[in-house]
Amino acid sequence: MWNKNKITDLLGIEYPIFQGPFGGGLSTVELTTTVSRLGGLGGYGAYTLSPQDIFDVDRQIKTITDQPYNLNLWVSDHDIIDQEHTENLYQKAVEVFKPYYDSLGIEVPPLPPSFESRFQNQLQVIFDIRPKVFSFMFGLLDPDIIEKLKSQGTVIIGNATTVYEATALENTGVDIIVASGFESGGHRPSFLEKAELSTTGTFTLIQLIRDKVKIPVVAAGGIASGRGIAGAFKLGADAVQVGTAFLATEESGALPLHKEFLFSEASKSTTLTRAYTGRLGRGITTKITRDVLTATDKTLPFPLQTHFMGDLRKAALEQQKNDLVFFWSGQIAPILKHKKASTLMKSLIEEASELFK
């Protein structure tokens, strides 16, 4: 059976299909529990949440289902070097983005307040709630932390965009590696090299990583159908992670307009840019991403750029100037067709099962 392997045994799930753990309010309890209840691994991105919020979300999910789900955090949750560097970048960002603020009739915001890392406090909650599955991005965890988490029964998943990141993760003791290909929507979780230098396609990346590591590998990026699942498995993946297709469903936390864009002609063109958050991420190409595509050294460090762009995004949405908004999307969006998470999940299972006969 195609759906019975090392990953399903390790996680206690029926199907090796993961739902991408979206951050920034895009994950919901409803989406996560829908996928888990149907035999996959639901995911919840918690990097913006307070420790108490994480505790509350975990409790909500566990009141709905006793099936495993993936709780995701970011090891490196900011790129701030020092105040002087930030102030210099702020002046450059004002030069680049002021015309867009002017076009909306709003003032350029002041330099965002400094950011305090949340990760250590968030990590303590992981020890407290003892999730079945915990994944992390943008870095490595100390092997002692991984061993402690595993000793309490938590399965650990790391995210890699290159074969070097994958081997580094394996050396720290993680159980599973998600191979995040160039096609993926959202942020590129690179951590050994600049994200711009870590842009290998999913199907190449699976093969490179499979050749170098012994632990299970999950293919992420460009997968939204049974054909994608079958292709990934043929190349050595033990599971797949589906992001954009689940982001487009009614159950996700994305804005209705965002979902409309994912099903529109606009989804045929996506761009990797730092313009909206300060970290490289893929979304639907709009005027602002075309104009500032090369302005990688003229954005504030993450997450200060996110705050800096907040007023612009809000005004653009209110004024329906959608070409000034950035909507996360992977390259696979043009083939999307399901608007309910349950329908999507059942379709993935049925299509893959038919192809594996």
Image (cartoon, helix red, strand yellow):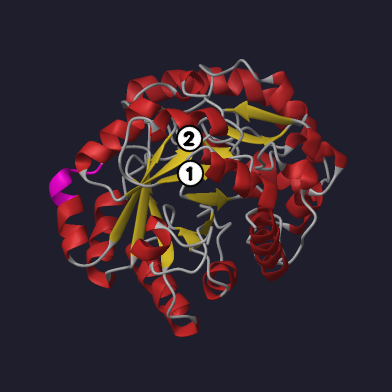
Within-10-Å neighbours for mark 1: few <14, some 14–19, many 20+: many
In the image, what residue occupies the spot 38% across and 28% down?
163
The answer to whether the residues at label 2 and label 1 have Cβ atoms under 8 Å apart is: yes
Q: Residue at x 32, y 36 (%)?
A: 213
- Is 337 displayed left or right of 37 in the figure? right
Residue 343 visible somewhere in the drawing: yes
* Residue 73 higher or lower than 287, as above or below: below
Residue 29 image position (x, y, % from top left): 53, 71
At x 44%, y 75%, the residue is 67
Question: Can you say whether 258 is above or below 203 in the image?
Answer: below
Task: Return the residue nearer the eye: 2 or 176.
Answer: 2
Task: Inspect the image, locate mark 1, and give the three-letter code of the amino acid beneath it.
Answer: Ala
For mark 1, give the secondary structure: loop
Quadrant of the rendered image containing residue 228: top right
User: Quadrant location of residue 154?
Assistant: bottom left
Q: Is residue 143 magenta?
A: yes
Q: Residue at x 55, y 34 (%)?
A: 202
Q: Quadrant of the C terminus?
A: bottom right
Q: Which residue is mark 1?
A: 237
Horizontal side of 352 relative to 239 (left or right) equals right
Q: Residue furthest bottom?
A: 63
Q: Position of residue 342 (x, y in %)?
A: 67, 70
**Which residue is label 2 attached to?**
206
Q: Earlier in the sequence, mark 2 or mark 1?
A: 2
- Whether residue 74 sits left or right of residue 352 in the image: it is left
Q: Which residues are magenta?
A: 141-145
Q: In front here: 138 or 154?
A: 154
Q: Secondary structure at mark 2?
A: helix
